[in-house]
Amino acid sequence: MALLSILFLFFLLLPLLLLKGKKKNGKGFKLPPSPPGLPIIGNLHQIGSLPHRSVAQLSKKYGQVMLLHFGITPVVFVTTPEMAKEVLKNQDVNMCSRPLLQGPRKISYNFKDISFTPYGEWWRDIRKICALELLCPKAVKSYLFVREEEIARMVDSITKVSPAPVDLSEKLASVIDKVICRTAFGKIYEGRDLDNGKLSEAVRDVLVCLNNFSGEDFFPSFGWIINMLTGHTAKVDRALNNLNSFFEKAIVDHLDSNRPKPDREDIIDVLLRLQRDQSSRVPITKEHIKGVLKDVFLGSVDSGALSMVWAMTELARNPRVMKKVQDEIRSHVGSKGKVDESDIESLHFFRATLKENLRLHPPSPLLFARETMSDCKLDGYDIPNKTRIHVDVFAVQRDPRYWKNPDEYIPERFIENPIDVNGKSYEYLPFSSGRRICPGITMGLAIVESVVANLLYSFDWKLPSGMTVEDINMEESFNLSINKKTPLILVPIPCEFSVA
């Protein structure tokens, strides 16, 4: 019944939508090439459950700058390093804003975060705060003890169940959940709501809502009716309430005058100090604090855990590489019992395996939509003001002109070409580039590198009985990040060499 209502509404408003679309395009514009679409829905039917792959495939026919219509909304996709550089560097100043989408509006506390807030004074201020106070190398180093303690607990918990198979997907989600929770809130909140992995679950619910179809984003005039009929609005509200209740509790705890003075500031302490100081040109409210916390969790808990799962999956599928990287780690670290973060700089092949993993499985295969702030051109095509633009990092990082055998897992390519993750090389953009580059690169890499290095140092990893390399499931699911569709189950065998 709901579907019939939606279709009736589409056809009722079709003449108005077509008229509006013609007015917006105007005459004389040379727009990018576009696949033929259907009335009303445009090209929505051509974007499957893995949009990064759908876009990459369509671009082979329609080019490196391609226009798709999602409902009545035009969206431009770029799929090559050259065009990524044009968007993220050469024209970054005109293409670095965000569209005012309704899903992100709620999730970002009415655009009071970093990820989804349009370019402007508040965004510049909070981005600077994050760079100087929250996520700078000094701040990340101050949380070293948290990473070391939680990694040690994880290794101990795996040792106790060995040689039984371990759900590494669950273990990795749990450890990064605890590290980020202690970093942001000062503690794990054991025994309370959203504890023991439920915080990660709440974060993923929010990501699912952001990924799901939102009628308002593609049919601004009446999309709210679609969202209501499909239940999308209720799902977003429920996911946000779960996350918001936890943030609210954590902030109240930090404002408690009887709270013991912490030895070190956590992220909420820093934000509350800045709120009291009010040196920012834009006042920091509780909603701003929640928006930044949301960024920390969406950017770290989900993408960090997924990066580690894919890293261990690729190594399990490539025993030669697994042995080579373990030999390097164990030879360098010796018998001291753990890999310190200071060791990792010297582990060149290990770091190459992580870089190759980020190339094949980027945390954000489609960068969040940018919005142009003036009329501009891309590859000779006209891009009108207020146009949404996505960079397909998945396609960029598999461009055969830059990557030999691009679909193959070959870590050695990063030994021969020591490219970095800092967004300066536009054929490799795991964390984006330009003004909208991920502010949490240093923190994210510190966690991922330490956890994976210690797993490889402490254990030999075998496949469950009766399973072969060919049986490892590599299917993806898409929730803004590339998820591994099925859990990674491996058998840990403690390595005596690593025990002091």
Image: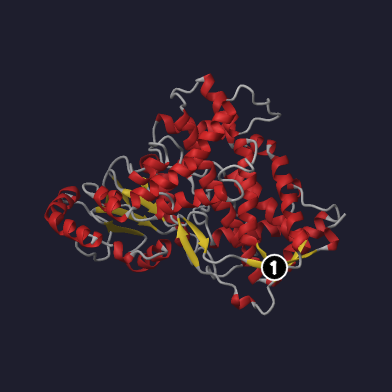
Q: Is residue 371 visible?
A: no
Residue 281 drawn above or below residue 23: above
- Residue at 65 percent of width and 59 percent of height: 352
Front-most of residues 287 and 480:
287
Q: Is residue 109 visible?
A: yes
Front-most of residues 368 and 425:
368
The spot of residue 207 in percent (x, y) is 45, 51
Report which residue position mark 1 lands on. 165
- Residue at 40 percent of width and 50 percent of height: 210
- Residue at 72 percent of width and 58 percent of height: 455
Give the position of the C terminus as an image quadrant.
bottom right
Instruction: Specify the quadrant of the image occupied by residue 376.
Output: top left
Task: Tell me the SS state at disc 1.
Answer: loop
Q: What amino acid does circle 1 point to?
A: Pro
The spot of residue 380 in percent (x, y) is 30, 54
Instruction: Specify the quadrant of the image occupied by residue 120.
Output: top left
The spot of residue 169 in percent (x, y) is 61, 60
